[in-house]
Image (cartoon, coloured by chain):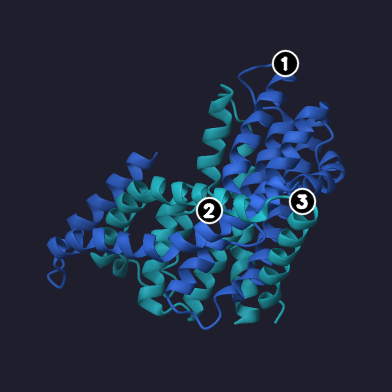
Chain colours: A blue, B cyan
């Protein structure tokens, strides 16, 4: 997949530049490494800072508390998930995702998939529980989009965090829509 | 505005909770930030690769072929479900072109913040347990993303 994106972006860009005499593609290619350096330097320090703070949330048990709060709600959303362990991992994945703790979220999410797979009668087919879990996961439930804020900060935005509330609203709409569609598909399949 | 209180509140709750739970907060912070540094280092090759491709594509001027006012948001929407780093690279191009506090800068930020790399995550999670038939997972995930993007347009219109 990523190979296709790469070849499309580079192929179309360089191909088109041969017909566009206003651009110097050689310079653009050489300068791209410097742009990458600028981007990394601008978002890197805030990622380092936030990872430190979030590690405190994780190690002091705050993340676990948050995850326990989510559990009853997730149980309602995913009625087909019976295993206590799967629900445990799903909650920690969603909680970590909400707080932007990617390094905690992914291992928990993969363990959740393994637990769900144990309850799965058809090993090559996704279960309802898996699909609901992944729709919830991919609808992007992040409370603070720290990478975006870091980039806005680097571009000297007058208010880098002004996007927090609009992002929370948009991501909630996305989650509600995804779960609603999921609910209706499940109900239709059950008939 | 409420936006400005969210980060300080989260920080103080985390620090106080850690302190009263007798966590060695300073050491824990250092340990976590070292992990963060490792993350940053590990994404260097990906960011270089994506900035390289995105810069070639955007600066070739090919988007002028599409025309219309939303032409610069379209690649963002197309790339978003596949690669977070590609959209991040693209987001910085939008900031360069329109300014970070412009309508487009704001809209692209909210789109980036409100959605996720759906196709990438589905591929990773399903392949990790050997699932081949993913049924309606992709449709559900992309439907959620599209709703999120439409919501971003509406919310940014209201707030901006």
Q: Nearer the viewer, residue A141 or B60?
A: A141
Quadrant where the C terminus of chain A sits is top right
Residue to which mark 3 is pinned = B22
User: What mark, if any, has residue A121 been given in the picture?
Assistant: 1
Question: Residue A12 appears in which quarter of the rendering?
Answer: bottom left
| Mark 2 element type | helix
The chain to which mark 1 is attached is A
Residue at position x 48%, y 73% in the image = A153
For mark 2, does the 10 Å Cα neighbourhood hold few (<14), some (14 to 19), or many (20 or more) residues? many
Residue at position x 72%, y 16% in the image = A121
Q: Nearer the viewer, residue A160 or A130?
A: A160
Rendered location of residue B153, percent (x, y): 59, 70
Q: CA distance from mark 3 to mark 2?
A: 19 Å
Residue at position x 61%, y 19% in the image = A124
| In the displayed structure image, the side of residue B97 where residue A179 appears, left or right | right
Question: Residue B2 appears in which quarter of the rendering?
Answer: bottom right
> Above or below — where is B96 with respect to A74?
below
Judged by depth in the image, the label closer to the viewer, 3 or 2, is 3
| Mark 3 element type | loop
Rendered location of residue A186, percent (x, y): 77, 36
Judged by depth in the image, the label closer to the viewer, 3 or 1, is 3
Residue to which mark 2 is pinned = B33
Judged by depth in the image, the label closer to the viewer, 1 or 2, is 2
Question: Reading the chain from its start, which is encountered first: label 3 or label 2?
Answer: 3
């Amino acid at each position: 997949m990523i190979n296709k994106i790469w070849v499309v972006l580079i192929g179309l860009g360089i191909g088109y530049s041969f017909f566009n005499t206003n651009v110097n593609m050689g310079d653009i290619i050489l300068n791209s490494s410097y742009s990458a350096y600028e981007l990394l330097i601008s978002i890197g320090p805030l990622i380092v800072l936030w990872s430190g703070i979030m590690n405190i949330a994780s190690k002091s048990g705050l993340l676990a508390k948050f995850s326990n709060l989510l559990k009853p709600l997730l149980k309602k959303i995913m009625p087909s998930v019976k295993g206590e362990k799967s629900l445990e991992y799903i909650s920690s994945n969603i909680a970590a995702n909400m707080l932007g703790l990617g390094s905690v979220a992914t291992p928990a999410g993969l363990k959740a998939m393994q637990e769900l797979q144990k309850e799965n009668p058809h090993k090559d087919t996704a279960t309802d529980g898996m699909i609901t879990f992944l729709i919830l996961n991919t609808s992007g439930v992040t409370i603070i989009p720290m990478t975006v804020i870091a980039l806005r900060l680097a571009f000297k935005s007058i208010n880098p965090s002004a996007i927090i509330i609009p992002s929370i609203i948009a991501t909630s709409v996305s989650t509600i829509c995804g779960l609603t569609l999921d609910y209706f598909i499940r109900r239709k399949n059950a008939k | 505005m409420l936006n400005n209180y969210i980060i300080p509140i989260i920080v103080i709750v985390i620090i106080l909770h850690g302190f009263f739970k007798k966590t060695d907060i300073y050491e824990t912070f250092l340990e976590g930030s070292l992990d963060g540094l490792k993350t940053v280092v590990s994404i260097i090759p990906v960011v270089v690769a994506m900035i390289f491709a995105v810069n070639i594509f955007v600066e070739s001027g090919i988007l002028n072929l599409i025309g219309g006012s939303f032409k610069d948001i379209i690649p963002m929407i197309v790339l978003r479900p596949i690669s977070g780093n590609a959209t991040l690279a693209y987001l910085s191009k939008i900031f360069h072109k329109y300014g970070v506090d412009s309508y487009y800068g704001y809209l692209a930020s909210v789109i980036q913040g409100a959605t996720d790399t759906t196709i990438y995550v589905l591929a990773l999670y399903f392949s990790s347990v050997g699932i081949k038939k993913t049924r309606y997972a992709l449709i559900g995930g992309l439907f959620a993303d599209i709703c999120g993007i439409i919501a971003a347009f509406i919310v940014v219109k209201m707030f901006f």
